[in-house]
Amino acid sequence: MTEIRVLPSRTAYSRPDELGPRILGGEGPYLVGADGTRYLDASCGSGSLIFGHGDERMIDALRAQSRKLTLFPSRHFSSEIVERYARALLDFGPPSMSRAITFSSGSDAVEAAIKLALQHHFAAKRPQRRKILGRNASYHGNTIAGLGAGGFVARRKPYEDVLAPCTKASHAHCAACEFGLQAQICALECAQSVEDTILEEGPENVAAVIVEPIVGAALSAAPPDPRYLPRVCEICRHHDILLIADEVMTCFARTGRPFASMHWNVEPDIVICGKAISAGYYPLSALLVNERVVHGPLARDRYFQNGQTFACSPAGAAVGLTVLDRLANGSVAANATRMGELLRGSLRKELPGELINSVRGMGLMVGFDISTSAFKNPQALSPGHYSDRFQRAALKRGLVIYASSGSAGSEEGDHAMLLLPLTISEREVKEATASLVAAANDLLETENK
Ligand SMILES: Cc1ncc(COP(=O)(O)O)c(C=O)c1O
């Protein structure tokens, strides 16, 4: 078991009173600490590092393109590698997509998607369509508009009064159904709540509905009922509202398919890609956009009014092309499906059920709930306390997990995810399971002493 040293931090991101173990490097699925400790990384840059750390092909691609050209003014010139990448992205995406634009983070791609939806209706002479609708317990990045569109209560809290207004429909997480229904007897009330919200706001005022096909940070890998997303898509089409799929965490084979919406044959109007799009080797994100959207602003106004310094980066394109090349034969996605099933199966079997329940997910996006009722005095503690404790217990057992809270309404409901590299082996899946089981038992023991 590894001892965690606590030191003061000078970075604005860490809690001022504590600093985790110092990391020197990464090797494949492991982070390597300054003291030589190896941590199996099931956080992977929040799901970005699909090929793990220190991947030579990714490093070589970035190095080679950086020697030639990293940035250029994309309004004045074109670039062969950027065009090639846009075509490759469209070939990889849902068939109806016809344009691709790259940016540098999931948050700025979400922001761009929202602006593109607004510009689409503006150019189509429907300037009153200004509302973006979201869902409870969702996360769409950290800008004022993205955080506004999301329903992650704890992350919104310090900014609540200035966030972009966005009415929320119910989420679609069956284990915490907002209508108190069992999956088998529901009539898809969560999808109906999307339509009810549209009708309350007035369909003529709504520009777009934004959804994560499988909710990540806010619900830890919660896939909806298989009928849900097709129905939401139908509702949006019926009211001439754009459907934005935020696939920042689910894209590029994380869930075993190129995009999670493909599990249910749904073709959104705008698909937001991030994280795995560069396998973590360059700050890259993208929007894929269908003809319906392109025929709005891009045709009439001639371009999308949303310039950004790192948009259309040749360095990002080179990294992105290498990722696509490696995903092309489907073996990485197949491994994600196989290893994901193995991992969920062994977690369900081996984890103490009184603490961990509702193991879920698709491919190597794996999540579960942490039941605070397993502890002696759960009500005295703040939400997120036990997911934080569980994260630390896992770290002591050499495993990095992605812990979160808010799956049971407001800030209540602790949960966590494992987001291993998609190239993970059976042996490493067994190691992750053993470390997580040991961490769960450690936590039960220390908290219930
Ligand atoms: C679904 C979703 N959208 C948007 C974002 C924001 O991406 P980034 O952190 O790259 O800005 C995230 C990040 O976790 C995400 O999971």
Image (cartoon, rainbow, N blue to C red):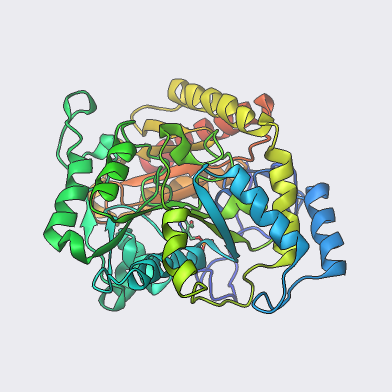
Say if 186 sits above or below 29 in the image: above
Say if 160 sits above or below 179 in the image: below
Q: Nearer the viewer, residue 88 or 352?
A: 88
Q: Residue 245: image x %, image y %?
A: 42, 51
**Count of numbered marks:** 0
Q: Nearer the viewer, residue 279 or 247?
A: 247
Instruction: Inspect this view and state whether residue 281 appears.
Output: no
Instruction: Inspect this view and state whether residue 340 appears.
Output: yes
Q: Nearer the viewer, residue 378 or 106?
A: 106
Residue 6 relative to residue 319: left or right: left
Q: At 78% across and 47% down in the image, what residue appears?
A: 55
Name the quarter where the N terminus is drawn. Answer: top right
Q: Residue 69: image x %, image y %?
A: 81, 70
Q: Residue 418: image x %, image y %?
A: 52, 40
Q: At 38% across and 43% down in the image, what residue appears?
A: 447
Q: Residue 83: image x %, image y %?
A: 70, 60
Q: At 76% across and 57% down in the image, what residue appears?
A: 318
Quadrant assignment, res 159: bottom left
Quadrant assignment, res 383: bottom left
Residue 285 relative to residue 271: left or right: right
Name the quarter where the C terminus is drawn. Answer: top left
Residue 185 relative to residue 46: left or right: left
Q: Nearer the viewer, residue 95 or 403?
A: 95
Q: Residue furthest left?
A: 200
Q: Residue furthest front?
A: 300
Residue 347 relative to residue 276: left or right: left
Q: At 62% across and 42% down in the image, what residue appears?
A: 398
